[in-house]
Amino acid sequence: MIASTKRLYAVNALGALHEERLLRKTVNETCGDAPAISNGFPVLQYSKALHGLQALLHAKTVPMDLILMAVLLMVHFESLRESFVPALVHVEHAIRLLHSSTTFDARKVDPNLVRSIMRLDVQGSLYLGMRIPGLPFYTAATDNIFPTSLHDLAQARDLVNVWTCRLFHFMRAEADEHKFKDVGGVPLEKLAKSHELTQTFVDLDALLWDFMHKPTLKLTVREQLGLGMLRTRVKINKILAATCLYSEATIYDAFLPDFEDVLSICSYILASDAADRRLLTVSLDEGLLQPLFTVATHCRESRIRHSALVQLKKLASSEGSPRGIWHVEAMVRTAEVCIRFEEACCERANPSCSDIPEWCRVHSSGFDGWDVQPPKRQRVFAHMRLRPNGMDGEWADFSEAIEWSVSSHSMLGGAERQLLMEHDQLGQRNSYRHRQTVSARDGWALGPQTQIFNVAVRKKNCGCSNYDLDDLQKSCVQ
């Protein structure tokens, strides 16, 4: 009874926050700027849910399914508030509880709940370059058999997530050491693991292709688009698995056909009649944003990467997903900076791969701002790293600041947003400034699967089973 009451607090908090966001959106669309709408009730319910979760964790018998369900509700709540650090902290603690061998048997937990946590776990590693996924141990215990055929889209999604989790665990825990730090000298067993993962994604792509062309298969339009998104994720994973041990950026030039396949699939999805609902077909970790961003930043063929950039911009436009989702804007801007920087080294207007030298290629890119509350998030930096002196040389950093000013009541509104992009190349601030007006509808999150990307959690998960929520309670909006 107590457990049900605590879960009810989390449901009330989430429902109240949804209602508050919807009310703000409705008022803003009808009256312009929305007035100050109190969110005190959902925050109060959320605080009670946190206290209730602490009480459950101090019980002798921990109802793990109930805890994971509460964690997912709280992640959704934090995602709607765009508080990404507390959201992923919830995920981290849930993973640590699953690591514990003294409280429960992980194989007895509802696998659907664990796979939901896994999707968030994978997202945290997709968009945070140093983070190691925490759930490969669970996938090894429950999903170690590679099927010979697929039965439905849910099985396909779970299989892609499992192998994506394993891939990023290998990349973060083992391969990145050779790719970014200790160049060369790769042990044979790591090379073998890279080839094994590459072949796995080749086989998985073939499974998805065969499943898609079954004569008796009947899929809805949304399911067809979701299957296409899974195929783009698998193709990108194949490229990452094949290149994860090599420090040279020119290694990606060998995968032009795969980049073009990814671009073709994404373009088809964006051109479909149901394009406005594409982000809800499957969660965004299997969606269009990351594959298109990878094509735009890793493929140096001008025609392909510029086409990918055009498709990326559609994700942030009024023709596609809800406008003003800030991380989509930030990723588009980061891709633009990478392309502009690399092509500035060439004399040709439309350079091919061979026209962009290794010393001028961006090896890694990203942006900050995830740990800042939405009203205060008025400046983020896009960061690029390259090696102008060769693979044994030092890293050189390149950054570009993106600034905007949003009226205090423009959340979920159609307000005009001013973006001021300030160029800072290799630490030397130039006089370059670019001002652009973007029509933005800010902040209506699509849920935890579409909002959790990047936080400041960089340590490998440990086996700790303690779930300390004091810091999370302090993060609530007063």
Image (cartoon, rainbow, N blue to C red):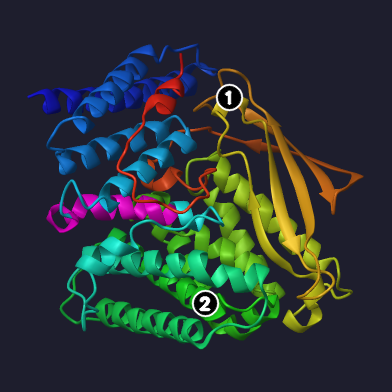
2 and 1 marks in contact (CB < 8 Å): no
Q: CA distance from mark 2 to mark 1?
A: 38 Å
Q: In the image, what residue occupies the spot 67% across and 76% down? A: 183
For residue 270, above or below residue 414: below
Return the residue at label 2. Answer: 239
Q: In the image, what residue occupies the spot 28% across and 76% down? A: 212
Q: From the viewer's side, name the closer residue of 409 and 178.
A: 178
| SS state under label 1 | helix
| Percent x, y of residue 73 | 28, 35
Mark 2 surroundings within 10 Å by alpha-carbon count, few (fewer than 14), some (14 through 19), many (20 or more)? some
Q: Farthest residue in the left direction? A: 1
Q: Which mark is residue 44?
A: none
Which range of residues does the magenta coloring cover? Answer: 106-123
Specify whether residue 76 is in view.
yes
| Percent x, y of residue 128 | 54, 53
Left or right side of 400 for 374: left
Return the residue at label 1. Answer: 375
Q: In the image, what residue occupies the spot 23% across and 63% down? A: 154
Q: Main secondary structure of the magenta part?
A: helix
Left or right side of 267 for 109: left
Q: Name the image quarter holding the N terminus.
A: top left
Q: Farthest residue in the front direction? A: 102
Q: Amino acid at mark 2?
A: Ile
Q: In the image, what residue occupies the spot 34% across and 50% down? A: 463
| Percent x, y of residue 473 | 40, 22
Q: Amino acid at mark 1?
A: Pro
Specify whether residue 267 is in view.
no
Instruction: Residue 121: say if magenta.
Output: yes
